[in-house]
Amino acid sequence: MSFLEFTEGPLWYVALTVFVVGVVWNIVAMLAMRVGSDAAVPRRSPLGGAIKAIFLHSVPHEGFFGRTAYHVIVGYLFHLGLFALLLFGAPHVAFIKEWTGLSWSPLPRWGFIIVSQIAFAGLILMWIRRLTDPIMRQISDRDDHTGTGLTMLAMLTGCFALGEASDFLRALHMLSVEILMLYFPFSRLMHAFTFILSRGFMGAAYGKRGYVP
Amino acid sequence: MSVRAFFLSMALAVAMAVSPAPARMAIAAEEGPVAGTVPGGSLGATSDAEFWREIRRGQPATISIPDPEAAVLIQSEGENWRNIRNGPISLYGGWLLLGLLILISVYFAIRGRITITEGRSGKKIVRFTQWQRIAHWFAAALFVLLSVTGLMLLYGRYGLREVIGPEAFSAVASASMQAHNLFGPLFLVATVILFIYFLRGNFLALVDLKWIVKGGGFLGGHASSHFYNFAEKAWFWMAVLLGLVLSVTGLVLEFPWLLESRLAQQLAHIAHATSALLLVAVGLGHIYLGAIGVEGALEGMTSGEVDANWAKDHHDLWYDDVVKRESAKAAGE
C-alpha cells in the first residue's frame, strides 16, 4: 500500500469517523445539557433573542468597532477565504464528487489562488495578533496554537500540492488534513459548529430578560 | 537527386523563405566566391554553416502569424540568462550567504551576546505599536516562507537533489514553486504596509554619520542614535526598495502577460534573484542582531516594550526624548 493509498484509504476513514462522531457527540452533548429551571416570566421571546444574537454577533458592535476592527476584518478574511477554497477549489470539488457524487462549479484557477491568498493572509494576521497582543497572548493556550498551527499546516501542504505534480504532495496534504480532522472535535476548532449554539444560548438568556446586547 | 541533395534543397528553400535579409542570402550564382558563401548554385549562395549560425544568433525570420516571438527559432539570450543564473548569481550569491553566516558566527564567537551595560532597570518604554508589530511579523513570516522556497528553487539542485534523489526533489521543487508563487503577491502588500508603518524616523540625519564613524559601537565604544540607528535605517530602505524590486519582478515572472517579452522575463529573473540574495543576506544579519546578538532587542517587536537601560545603550537620543516628554507630561499634570 502506497503512502497515498494509505492516506486516501484507511487513514481517511478513521479521520472521517472520528471527525463526524466527535462533532455529532459534542453537539448532542451540548443540546442535552440541562439548564436550571427559571420560574421568572419572560419579558421577551428567548427564541427571538437567540436569533438576534446569532446574527448580531456576526457584525462588530458599533461601540467597539475601532477596537475590534482588526480581528473582525482579518477573521472574515480567513474564514471566508477558507470556506471558498475548501468548497470551491477545483481539486476539492473533484474530491467531494469522487466521494459523494455531488458536484458544483469550481472557482477558476486564478480565483482559487486569490481566495487562498486571502485565507493565508487572514490566518497569519490572526496568529500574529494572538502572539503579539498582550491580552490575546495571556488568554491563548496550547489548544489555540495547536489548532491554528494544524490549520496552517493543512493549508500549506495544500498550497504545496497545487501543482498536482506529485502523489507524495497530495498524500502529505491528505495526512495533514486528517491530523486536523482527528484533532478537531477535541479542540476549540469545534467553534465552527458550536458558535450557533453558544450565541443562541446567550441570546436566549438575554432575550428572556428583554435585552440582547 | 540524392536524399542529401533533396534535404539541402529544402533547407535552402526554407532559408529563403524565412530570411529577413534576402540580399545576404540571395542566390548569387553569377557572383564570384566570397568569404562565407558557397560558389555554384546547388546549395545556394549561403553555406549551411552561415544559415544555421544566423538562426543560432536569434535572427528573426518572416512569418505569417502575429507573434513576433514565433519568428525566432533560437532565443540566444535564453542561454545567456541560463548561464548567468546558474553561474555568477548562484555562485556569488552562495558565497555571499555562506560568507555572512561565517562572519556572523565568528563575530558571535568573539563578541558574544551584547548585554545591557547596566543590566535591566525594570522600567519599560514603549517602542513599537501593535500595528507596527503586526506589519513587521506579517512581512517577516512571508519573508521566511519566500526565502526558504526561493533558495530551494535556486540551490536545491546542487545539494538536496543528490541526497533525496531526482524524483523526490521534483516534488520539493514543485511544492516550493507553488508556495513561492502563492505567497509572492502577498509580499508586495506586506512591503507597502511595512513602508507606511516604519517610514517615520527612518530618514538619514547627521548623527548617522557619527554612528558610522564609530562603527555603530559594535567594535566597542558607544555610538549615539535616535529611534533608529544607521544600520536599522539602511535595513529599512533595503527591505522596502529590494522588496519592491522583488515584488514587481516576481509579478512579471508569475504573470508573463504583463510584459510580453522573453528578454524582459529573463532580465526580471536576474533582478529578482540578485535582489533576493542581497535581501536574504542582510536579513540574516538583521535576524541575528534582533533575535540573538543583542539582549533585549527582540522584546521591542514581541511585546512592544523595551527596557529603559537597553534604550540608553542603543538609542540614547531617543531615550532622552522620551524622558523629556515624560517629564514635561508630569509637570503639566
Image: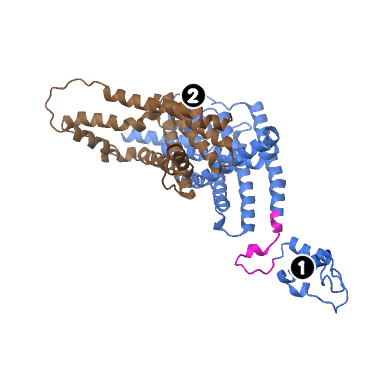
- Magenta-drawn segment: B60-78
- Name the disc covering residue A169, or none: none
Confirm whether residue B244 shows in the render: yes
Q: CA distance from mark 1 to mark 2?
A: 85 Å
The one nearer the camera, B18 or B194, is B18
Task: In the rendered view, tell whether residue B40 sits above or below residue B116.
Answer: below
Residue on which the image places disc 2: B120
The circle on residue B10 is: 1
B259 relative position to B80: left or right? left
Residue B264 is inside the magenta segment: no
Provide the secondary structure element on which disc 2 rests. loop
Task: Name the tint of chain A in the rendering.
Answer: brown
| Residue at screen point 60% across, 36% down | B284
Q: Residue at x 67, y 40 (%)?
A: B155
Q: Between B76 and A173, which is closer to the camera in this rendering? A: A173
**Can residue B129 be seen from the camera position used here?**
no
Judging depth in this view, the residue of B16 and B316 nearest the camera is B16
Q: Colour of chain B?
A: blue
Among the two numbered marks 1 and 2 on one chain, the one whose residue lies closer to the N terminus = 1
